[in-house]
Amino acid sequence: MAVYLVFAYDAEYVDFFNPRGYVKTGVSREDQVAFEAWATSAGVTAGYGPAYLPRGEYEAALRTGVVDVVATTDRAFAMQVAATSADFTLVDQDGDRIDVGTPGDGDGGSVGTDGPDVFVEEDGDRRIDAGAGDDRMTYAQERSSYSVSLAEDGTVTVAKPGGSTDTLISIEEVTFTDGRLIFDLDSANAAAAYRLYGGAFDRMPDEGGLRYWTNAVDGGTSLRDAAAGFIDSPEFLSLYGADLSNAAFVSALYRNVLGRDGDAGGFAYWSAYLDGGGDRAEVLVQFTQLPEYVALSTADIENGYWVL
C-alpha cells in the first residue's frame, strides 16, 4: 500500500537522500513528480532529485523496501532531507509535519513514531520531535563534553562539542558513554530518593532502583523507611560490612554526602545521637536533605536525572 508524502518548498530544486547515498530519480508527469522511495519498520527515505520544478506542492509515493534510517513506521514520519536554499516543510498523508532547513545553515529535522524510537547524534543543528513512546537520543562522548538544559515545557537542548545544538521534543532519555539522563520521572519525591543513593552508596542511582523507590515514597512509604531499606540492603552490607560502628557510619555519611571529613562538632553530635539509641535511617535522611548536599547534587537532577 503506497504512502503519499506532500512537500512544499521555495528552493529551485530539492535533493532527497538516504545515509547510503543518492537513490533513483522519480518520474515527472504533468504538474506532479513521483519520487521513488522505500518505507520499512526501520526507516523511510524519499527518492533522489535534483528535480527542477516550479514552486508548489508535489507528491512522493513510497513503496516497501530496505533502507537504513532510524525512527519511523510504514507511514512517512521520519526522513532525512536536504535543500539548496530556503526552508520547506514535509507533510505526510495524516498531516504530520517535518520542518527542515537547508544544508548551508546546518538545520535538520526528524520526527519519531508512536512507538519507541532511537535517534543518533549527527553533525549540525537538529530539531527532533520524538513523538509518543519511550524515545532515546544517543551521543558518542561523555556527558561532560555536552551542555544539557531542560525547559519548563519539557524541551531538551543539547549543545554539542562542535558548537551546534540539538533541540529534542518529547524525548524520555539522553544517553552518553558514561551514563544517561532521564526526563520522564515526574514526582516531587524523586530528588529525595535520588539523594539516598549518594548518601548510602556513594554513587548515582540505577534507573530501575530510582523508579522503584520514587514510586514507593509516592505510594506512602516514608523517606525514613526508604532509607532503612538502603541500610538493610546487600549493597550496603558489601560496602561497609556487618559490624559498622556508629562512628564509622557517621564518617561514611560525611564522605559520601559532603565529600569531606566531618567537622569536630558535627561528628561528635551525630555519633552521640546514635550511641544514645538514635536511628541510622533517620540520620541518613537528615544528611541527604542538608542544603549543602542539595546544592551539590542539583547538577545531576535539575536538567534530567543522571542515572547508570
Image (cartoon, rainbow, N blue to C red):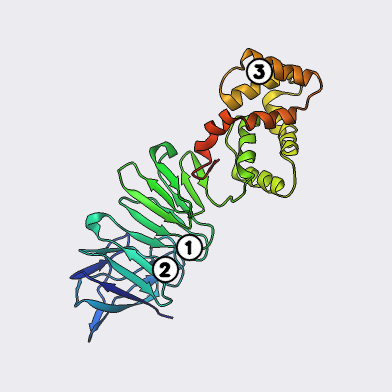
Instruction: Say which mark, if any, is on residue 266.
Output: 3
Mark 1 vs 2: CB contact within 8 A: yes
- Foreground label between 1 and 3: 3
Separation (CA) of disc 1 from disc 2: 10 Å
- Whether residue 73 sits left or right of residue 193 in the image: it is left
Mark 1 vs 3: CB contact within 8 A: no
The kind of residue tagged 1 is Gly
Label 2: which secondary element: loop
Name the residue beneath numbered marker 2. 77
User: Where residue 180 appears, x then y in whole percent?
Assistant: 51, 44
Vertical side of 245 occupied by 142: above or below: below
User: Where residue 283 appears, x then y in whole percent?
Assistant: 71, 27
Name the residue beneath numbered marker 1. 131
Disc 1 crowd, CA 10 A, few/some/many (<14, 14-19, 20+): some
Residue 203, visible in the rendered structure: yes
Q: Nearer the viewer, residue 72 or 165?
A: 165
Instruction: Name the residue rendered at 65%, 19% in the picture.
Output: 251
The kind of residue tagged 3 is Gly
- Whether residue 258 sits left or right of residue 242 in the image: it is left
User: Where residue 174 appears, x then y in whole percent?
Assistant: 47, 48
Q: Earlier in the sequence, mark 1 or mark 3?
A: 1
Q: Earlier in the sequence, mark 3 or mark 2?
A: 2
